[in-house]
Image: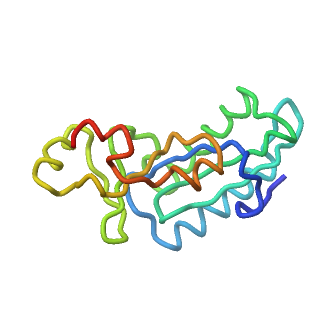
Amino acid sequence: MYVEFDKIEDKARIWIYQADKKLSQKEVDALEGEAKVFTEQWAAHGTGLMASAKVFHNQFLVLSVDESQHSASGCSIDSSVAFVRSMEEKFRVNFFDRTKVAFLLNDEIYLESIHNLKHKIEKGDIESSTLTFNNLVATKGEMKEKWVSPAQNTWLARYF
């Protein structure tokens, strides 16, 4: 069962998929439409999940399940991954490239390769106060509080 993202509980489990490029508004609208169709039929062991999906910053697809109603199972998670893979093909985007770190610079998303981080920090392109995205947050509540944080408050602190 689809629930608007703003109305799903803060304790709801989330998965964040970072696109390797910014999506156009037309692509965002289409992706959110596809995601709504997927979440309306998303089920675990035949039981419908109370789920949601939303695209943030034209770059991050977030899927969510309120597990107080029914938990996501391995098979249901596999089906969500298959859905995201199908969206990669449809929109010609990579949602599974874990070698890029997203930053918020001048209100724009900036992706940097993990391999270039130390150099970019030494050069001053990325500062300790630069906002970065922690795509491993587990719940909607954590997303609200910890998804976007200054680099110095993340695993990047070791570089400063």
Q: Quadrant of the C terminus?
A: top left
Task: Name which quarter of the figure residue 49 lies in.
Answer: top right
Residue toward you, 122 or 13: 122
- Residue at 67%, 64% (x, y): give it: 33
State whether residue 156 is above or below residue 90. Answer: above
- Residue at 63%, 62% (x, y): give it: 32
Residue 151 shown left or right of residue 138 in the figure = left
Residue toward you, 159 or 17: 159
Residue 131 x/y as whole percent: 36, 57
User: Tag count in the figure?
Assistant: 0
Residue 91 x/y as whole percent: 49, 57
Residue 141 x/y as whole percent: 65, 50
Task: Name which quarter of the figure residue 126 lies in.
Answer: bottom left
- Residue at 36%, 52% (x, y): give it: 102
- Residue at 65%, 50% (x, y): give it: 140
State whether residue 58 is above or below residue 155. Answer: below
Give the colour scheme of this rendering: rainbow
Residue toward you, 41 or 133: 133
